[in-house]
């Protein structure tokens, strides 16, 4: 853990003062990669940033986490709209007010979350339509994948493999909500293991 740079501490203070909210505790670490990562822990009153080497990306990452701090994710039933339009309305406003060009914000956000482009278009962010169209064109230009069956459809049989639960037939890890569904299913669940090549 290192001491946050002065600009980051000042940015947190300025954003929170403008919004009239309490400041989060800022934890700062360095990483060797170009891009930064961050997380907002509202219950702990903290924002943590792992700062990469790109200074523009450091600033965007901190502002992104501050947008979470100012606009907690809206709740829809049991699901959270973590990076929805309301969040991006706050985020793009912060980016613009604190020295990030729309083009940089679009480029860096879209590299992390594709939905950022859709929300930016809806919010009327300058250059968003062109960025979205360029992204779609790049996807269309990618070579098509050819899928083939690696292990034919079969009943899922759970077994432990070290710390993981896997299907004993194909060896595929079964995790999260899928594991919960398989465990509580009244009838045996089935799956197929596919592979692809460009």
Image: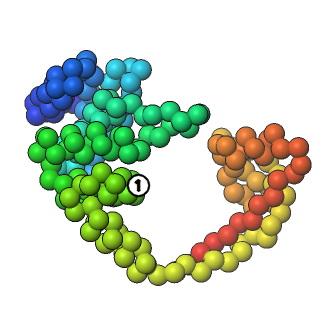
Q: Which of these two is toward me, 45 or 53?
A: 45
Q: Is residue 115 visible?
A: yes
Q: Residue at x 67, y 43 (%)?
A: 177
Residue 191 is situated, as x and y percent measured from the top left of the image, at: 77, 61
Q: Quadrant of residue 64?
A: top left
The residue at which mark 1 appears reads as: 115
Q: In this picture, is 78 found above or below 24?
A: below
- Residue farthest toward the right in the current orientation of the protein: 187
Secondary structure of the residue carrying tag 1 is: helix
Whole-percent x and y of residue 10? 12, 28
* Residue 139 in the figure: left or right of residue 187: left
* Crowd rating for badge 1 (residues with CA inside 10 Å; few <14, some 14–19, many 20+): some
Which quadrant would residue 69 be assigned to in this image? top left
Determine the residue located farthest toward the top in the rendered image: 22
Q: Residue at x 25, y 26 (%)?
A: 26
- Where residue 94 appears, x then y in whole percent? 21, 40
- Quadrant the N terminus occupies: top left
- The residue under the point 72% across, 58% down is 171
- Residue shown at the point (70%, 47%) measured from the top left: 178
Residue 116 shows in the view:
no
Foreground pick, 44 / 33: 44
Q: How many marks?
A: 1
Give how far across and how far down residue 146 sits, in percent: 59, 80
54 w.r.t. 28: above or below: below
Answer above or below: position of 127 versus 52. below
Horizontal side, residue 28 vs residue 80: left or right:
left
């Amino acid at each position: 853990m290192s001491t946050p740079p002065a600009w980051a501490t000042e940015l947190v203070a300025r954003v929170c003062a403008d919004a009239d909210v309490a400041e989060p505790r800022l934890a700062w670490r360095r990483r060797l990669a170009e891009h930064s990562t961050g997380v907002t822990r509202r219950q702990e009153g903290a924002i943590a940033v792992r700062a990469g080497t790109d200074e523009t990306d450091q600033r965007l990452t901190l502002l992104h986490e501050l947008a979470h701090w100012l606009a907690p994710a809206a709740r829809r039933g049991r699901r959270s709209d973590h990076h929805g339009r309301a969040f991006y309305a706050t985020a793009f406003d912060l980016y613009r007010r604190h020295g990030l060009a729309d083009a940089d914000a679009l480029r860096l956000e879209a590299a992390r979350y594709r939905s950022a482009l859709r929300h930016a278009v809806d919010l009327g962010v300058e250059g968003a339509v062109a960025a979205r169209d360029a992204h779609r064109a790049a996807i269309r230009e990618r070579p098509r994948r050819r899928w083939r069956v690696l292990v034919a459809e079969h009943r899922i049989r759970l077994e432990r493999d070290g710390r993981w639960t896997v299907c004993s037939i194909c060896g595929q890890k079964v995790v999260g909500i899928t594991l919960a569904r398989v465990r509580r299913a009244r009838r045996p669940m089935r799956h197929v293991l596919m592979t692809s090549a460009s």
